[in-house]
Amino acid sequence: MKEQKTAVIAITERLFEDLGTKWSWPEQAKSVILPNINAAGRTNKFGAFVSQFIRHPFSAIAGKIQNSKINLLQNRTLNAEIHSAEAILVDSGWGQEAADLIDAMPLLRWIHVVKTGVDHIPLDLLRKRSIMLTSIKGVHAQAVAEFAMGLIYCRLKRFIEHEYLMRQNHWKTIWSQGLAGKTLLILGTGEIGQKLAQLACGNGLLVTGVNRNGRQVNGFVKVQSPGTMAKLWAEADVVVNCLPLTSETQEIIAKREFSLLKTGAIFINVGRDETVDSKALLSGLAAGKPEWAALDIAPPSSTHPYRNHSQVLLTHYCAYTSEYAKTHQAKATIDNVKAFLAGEKLSGLVDLESGY
């Protein structure tokens, strides 16, 4: 790696709280701590982290707990530091409302999101300013693929039914389904989709896929674009959605898609919630197309039909989790910081036109 320069990098408070104990921060990166734009205040954990890791003095905001919304642009000391920052490290709690902050950073060249999705970032502004955007896409691909594969086993091997019957002290042999020979349709052939395809092929599943342009990908028997994917839906025994959220994928999985499924198919979502039309899915479940759905999503409202639905298994954004999740995303982030300081190519670059 080339000799590293010194640069000011702004980092959101929440990111420090979540990942602080995992970091080995480069001394060349002078840090500015950004309060969360809608923060309710700092915790003692945050204060301890600042004391241990921040190399750049910033007493104006580091010494006092604030219990109200912080107006970043009215804090003159903070504004001066931000003005010289060349990069920002952020998380999912930082979004479109930050456009004014970006405008106050004339030297900004790079934003890194310690998440996979970037739909909460003002992409139009980044395109206008030619600001690089990276995320940790691919870092959790293995974990997400394993989670999806586990859900396939869960349904086809009827583990939930087994557990329920045993709790009722009702001993009964339940006939399950085999995986070999069934067709798995994966929506999104990126790193998660490819990892899942590898696992699925190892279990004898026939794997097909859908991506933006129908580009063929190793591990998939065939790949189609959204405009030509109808036959793949009709052939699928299992559909796993791994799609990111973009203007093109918003509710791309809708009534037509579910109507194409064979009766008894299952649907698993480890992609973004908003890519699925929930009303269409509920209608499909009522018709047995799909017969069952597993959704790794944000908690629906207490009155949402997903709640307590007998054909729906809900998990709360758990697909990426593993004992190594935070360590891996911290390493990916700090490696990118080092590459930025050395003027080297960054990992996880986002195409600002496609949005992923």
Image: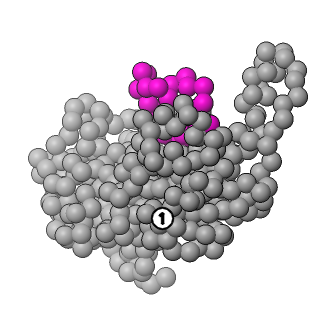
Q: Is residue 136 above or below residue 38?
A: below
Residue located 49% across and 49% down the image: 257
Residue 58 among those drawn in magenta: no
Q: Is residue 342 left or right of residue 203?
A: left
Q: Quadrant of residue 309?
A: top right
User: Percent position (x, y) of residue 201?
Assistant: 73, 62
Q: Is residue 196 left or right of residue 42?
A: right
Which residue is under mark 1?
228
Q: Is residue 37 above or below residue 132?
A: above
Residue 299 among those drawn in magenta: yes
Q: Quadrant of residue 235?
A: bottom right
Note whether residue 347 is visible.
Answer: yes
Q: Is residue 182 left or right of residue 50?
A: right
Label 1: state its secondary structure: helix
User: Percent position (x, y) of residue 316?
Assistant: 52, 36
In this figure, which colouring scheme has been used for the structure?
one colour
Q: Nearer the viewer, residue 194 or 236?
A: 236
Residue at far top of view:
168
Residue located 32% across and 57% down the image: 247
Count of numbered marks: 1
Residue located 73% across and 54% down the image: 182
In the picture, the quarter occupied by the C terminus is bottom left
Q: Nearer the viewer, residue 139 or 243?
A: 243
Magenta stretch bounds: 291-312
User: Percent position (x, y) of residue 265?
Assistant: 64, 44
Q: Nearer the viewer, residue 164 or 60?
A: 164
Task: Name the dominant secondary structure of the magenta segment.
Answer: loop
